[in-house]
Image (cartoon, rainbow, N blue to C red):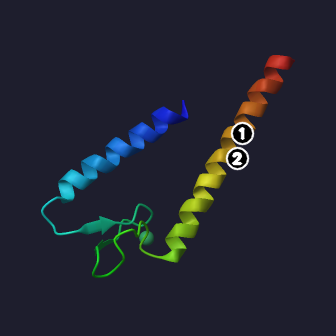
């Protein structure tokens, strides 16, 4: 189930990467969509444009997980009833 979500995200990232191909080493922040030149503006392993976006992304992920757990618990409670 979670694997499908990961696969979908990865294929979306691939499509974006293909569109960016030709521009030498450009990367895009998945949070604010700002772009930069890899190895010039940021390190090659940088994913987010800034620490702020990294924090925002990790918070959003935690919130999503919490929402899913709440939903699962609510569904489970209904089933028990
Ligand atoms: Zn950003």
Q: Nearer the viewer, residue 67 or 14?
A: 14
Q: Residues within 10 Å of mark 1 (few under 14, many from 20)?
A: few
Q: CA distance from mark 2 to mark 1?
A: 5 Å
Whether pointer 2 and pointer 1 mark residues with C-beta atoms closer than 8 Å, the reply is yes
Q: Which residue is mark 1?
A: 69
Q: Secondary structure at mark 1?
A: helix
Q: Residue 51 location, x and y as percent?
A: 52, 76
Q: Residue at x 74, y 39 (%)?
A: 70
Left or right: 71 in relation to 15 = right
Q: Which residue is mark 2?
A: 66
Left or right: 41 in relation to 21 = right
Q: Residue 12 location, x and y as percent?
A: 33, 45
Q: Residues within 10 Å of mark 2 (few under 14, many from 20)?
A: few
Q: Nearer the viewer, residue 7 or 80?
A: 7
Above or below, 75 relative to 28: above
Q: Secondary structure at mark 2?
A: helix
Left or right: 79 in relation to 8 = right
Q: Residue at x 30, y 66 (%)?
A: 27
Above or below, 17 relative to 2: below
Q: Residue furthest left?
A: 22
Q: Residue at x 56, y 66 (%)?
A: 56
Q: Residue at x 50, y 70 (%)?
A: 53
Left or right: 33 in relation to 58 = left
Q: Which quarter is ligand 1 in?
A: bottom left
Query: Looking at the rendering, in which quadrant would you find the N terminus?
Result: top right
The quadrant holding residue 32 is bottom left
Above or below, 26 relative to 17: below
């Amino acid at each position: 189930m979670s694997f499908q979500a990961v696969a979908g995200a990865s294929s979306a990232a691939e499509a974006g990467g293909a569109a960016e191909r030709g521009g030498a080493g450009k990367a895009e922040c998945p949070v604010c969509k700002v772009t930069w030149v890899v190895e010039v503006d940021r390190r090659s392993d940088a994913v987010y444009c800034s620490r702020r976006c990294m924090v925002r992304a990790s918070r959003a992920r935690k919130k999503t997980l919490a929402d899913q757990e709440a939903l699962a618990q609510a569904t489970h409670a209904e089933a028990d009833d």
